[in-house]
Amino acid sequence: MTFDLPRLLLLFLSIVSIAWSKEIKDIEFARPHGYSLTLDAWRPDDAQVRGAVILVHGGGWEAGDKRTYIGPWFTTLTAAGIPWFTINYRLAPRFPHPAAVEDIEAAVAWVRGHAREYQVDPDRIVLMGESAGGHLAALAALRDKVKVAGLVSFYGIHDIPQWKIQRGELPRNIALYLPQANDAALVEASPITYVKRGQAPVLLVHGTADQGVPWQQSQSFCEATRKVGARCDMQLIEGAPHGVENWEKELRFQIWKAPTVAWLHRQLR
């Protein structure tokens, strides 16, 4: 009989972490115009103050909630002992841009305001989003309405005009998110527009076989970030499609976990 020691160690750490932890669900963090927004929170059940990650789900700006699409993030961060908050935000078409971005900014402000209660360092908060959530997290991190210690974007849309060219048309869900989808609106809603020196460090994770959001979206965003003297790290997952949950189907796609955790530990310590 053979034993996969790395897997056994990860399983052991996960069991220990879950045993000594606390998860709280459905906490209201904002009520814009009477619309209740909630989050779920997890943290180790001890007295240590830590940095934390706010998770932003994808879903094309029009679908999903705080528990969809990002299941692998919960288990990976929990096993690593990294506190996390996963949030709901208002969806298109009922709530067009910039409602969702404002909701993420409200979540950051809420976590900072409740930092002592949740034993979180308010100056060590990282935003982490995937797909449309990566786009929204990047906007919130770069618009300077709130301060964060880092941004992690998994296959996010960072340059909408470029995405339109790459796709050969403007995707339907962008038209729902941006009802006035003229050239100026596409630029205003693109995170790459706000890249600047002194911004929070960025980690980009992208599959090279992504048919929904070409990996060149991350490449050009990272190049623009480095060009202004800000820090950007990028990890390409060879052959991986769109969606971190799809990456769970093959072990070779799961190589994102250790580098992402290591990057987060550097930003949160």
Image (cartoon, helix red, strand yellow):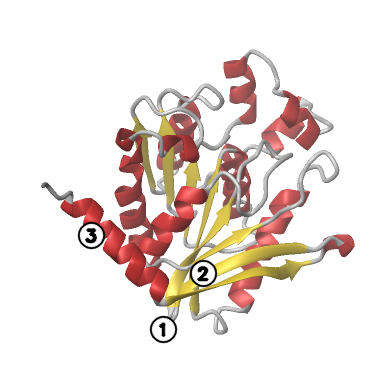
**In this view, 167 is above or below 4:** above
| Residue type beneath disc 1 | Asp
At 70% from the left and 38% from the top, the residue drawn is 188
Q: SS of the residue at dot 3?
A: helix
At 61% from the left and 42% from the top, the residue drawn is 58
Front-most of residues 204 and 34: 34
Q: Which mark is residue 9?
A: 3
Horizontally, residue 116 falls left or right of residue 45, namely right
Provide residue 205's location: percent of width, then percent of height.
42, 40
Cα–Cα span, label 1 and label 2: 12 Å
Quadrant of residue 264 within the rendered picture: bottom left
Look at discs 1 and 3 and give the one toward the viewer: 3
Look at discs 3 and 2 and give the one toward the viewer: 3
Are the residues tagged 1 and 2 within 8 Å (C-beta)? no
- Which quadrant does the C terminus fall into? bottom left
| Residue type beneath disc 2 | Trp
Q: SS of the residue at dot 1?
A: loop
Farthest residue, direction bottom: 47
Quadrant of residue 85 within the rendered picture: bottom right
Residue at the spot of label 1: 46
Provide residue 74's location: percent of width, then percent of height.
48, 57
Cα–Cα span, label 3 and label 2: 21 Å
Farthest residue, direction left: 1
**In this view, 254 is above or below 101:** above
At 70% from the left and 40% from the top, the residue drawn is 61
**In this view, 245 is above or below 5:** above
Horizontally, residue 264 falls left or right of residue 89, namely left
Residue at the spot of label 2: 42
Provide residue 144's location: percent of width, then percent of height.
62, 57
